[in-house]
Amino acid sequence: MGVEDDKAEHLLVLVHGILASPSDWKYAQAELKTRLGRNFVMYASSCNTFTKTFTGIDGAGKRLANEIKMVVKKRDNTLKKISFLTHSLGGLIARYALALLYTSSSNKGLIAGLEPINFITLATPHLGVRGKKQLPFLLGVPILEKLAAPIAPIFVGKTGSQLFLTDGKPNKPPLLLRTASDCDDGKFISALGSFKSRVLYANVSYDHMVGWRTSSIRRERELFKPPRRSLDGYKHVVDMEYCPAVPSEGPHFPPEAAKAKEAAQNATSMQTTLEYHEIIEQEMILGLQRLSWKKVDVSFHSAFWPFFAHNNIHVKNEWLHNAGAGVIAHVADHIKQQEKQQEYSLFITASL
């Protein structure tokens, strides 16, 4: 990590997506270090490289949690804060890891013993990837979307079942619903809620892997025609929306969801699958909307290679995907803003 980081207090964990590696963060890591300064430790996770992402969101999440514990232990005398910047599947892996790292004391939630500040996802399929163009390379063709679910585990293992919401027994909610709700040990929403800020960056088009709706946690009726003009200073970042928390009794897995899942698994048809997915999607959205989010929409319609949107958004390769430089700059400025707000709050508290 280097001598210059010896006294850094803020750990920024970078989590890559499926079939990827820490090298995907080479540009972002260098740029963020330059823009954020010496108080940040940039750590690109290396515990789930390439095919290790096939072992399931839960398996990968456990490895990530253990890796973060080791990083924090090595620097236990200096680190005070923690933030996450994730891409694609890495956002779901990180969400799972948060629940394992979360502790609460004196009404204050901690992640790996540190104060949680930012949780940021870039093109993450928060609602899964089945149906309604949530996996865009299937072109929204119903028969292809229907066939993809049983085939996915062959190529990407347990992760495929979890992303298509086909994992588990009929009376058990799929992992993404459990991750989004207060099921199991009750820590998933609490862990996410402990962060000062949660930000979603979503590609509005040209992303062949992850659809706009799932990465921005929106219902079909909530999608709108996005602006085509970039925000000043941030090329290809076209819109921002702050969504306050929406109180609810919380998502659950009601009997009708269990019946719909059993029907979809035992007698697969377009109708039974659609009914099941609609119920589960509603539950996931209700769970995640219990927290506030800043939603940032990104459009590469004017980029030289617009169809590389999924890799552009985090500049996987500096030369091929540099259209996403404005996104990384926007991420850096958001983190700096949060840091200033923290410093101001501490100043006010100390002055009282």
Image (spheres, rainbow, N blue to C red):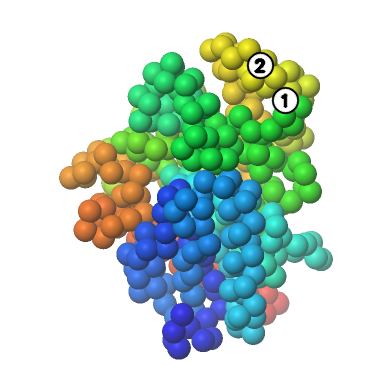
Q: Earlier in the sequence, mark 2 or mark 1?
A: 1
Which residue is situated farthest in the left direction here? 304
Q: Which residue in the rendered view is the most extreme toward the right?
A: 106
Relative to residue 269, is residue 326 drawn left or right? left
Amino acid carrying label 1: it is Pro
The residue indicated by pointer 1 is 170
Vertical placement of 196 versus 295: above or below?
below
Q: What residue is at 26 percent from the left and 39 percent from the top? A: 307
Picture quadrant where residue 72 is located: bottom right
Assess disc 1: are there few (<14), some (14-19) or many (≥20) residues with their C-alpha within 10 Å of its C-alpha.
some
Task: Name above or below for residue 137 compared with residue 194.
Answer: above
Label drawn at residue 266: 2
Along the line of sight, which residue is nearer the eye, 87 or 166?
166
Give x and y (percent) for residue 165: 60, 31
**Rendered position, 120 above or below 239:** below
Query: Where does residue 152 sit, x and y in percent of width and height?
Result: 49, 32
**Amino acid on which disc 2 is placed:** Asn
Tags 2 and 1 touching, CB below 8 Å: yes
Query: Residue shown at 51%/50% (left/top)?
Result: 53
- Residue 252 x, y percent position in the rendering: 75, 32
**Residue 32: numbered disc:** none
Label 1 sits on a secondary structure element that is loop
Q: CA distance from mark 2 to mark 1?
A: 9 Å
Q: Residue at x 67, y 67 (%)?
A: 112
Crowding near pointer 2: few (<14 within 10 Å), some, many (20+)?
few
Q: Nearer the viewer, residue 35 or 90?
A: 90
* Secondary structure of residue under mark 2: helix
| Res 208 seen here | yes
Residue 81 percent across, percent down from the top left: 60, 71
Residue at image location 57% in from the left, 47% down from the top? 55
Quarter of the image that includes the C terminus: bottom right
Residue at the front extreme, as displayed: 154
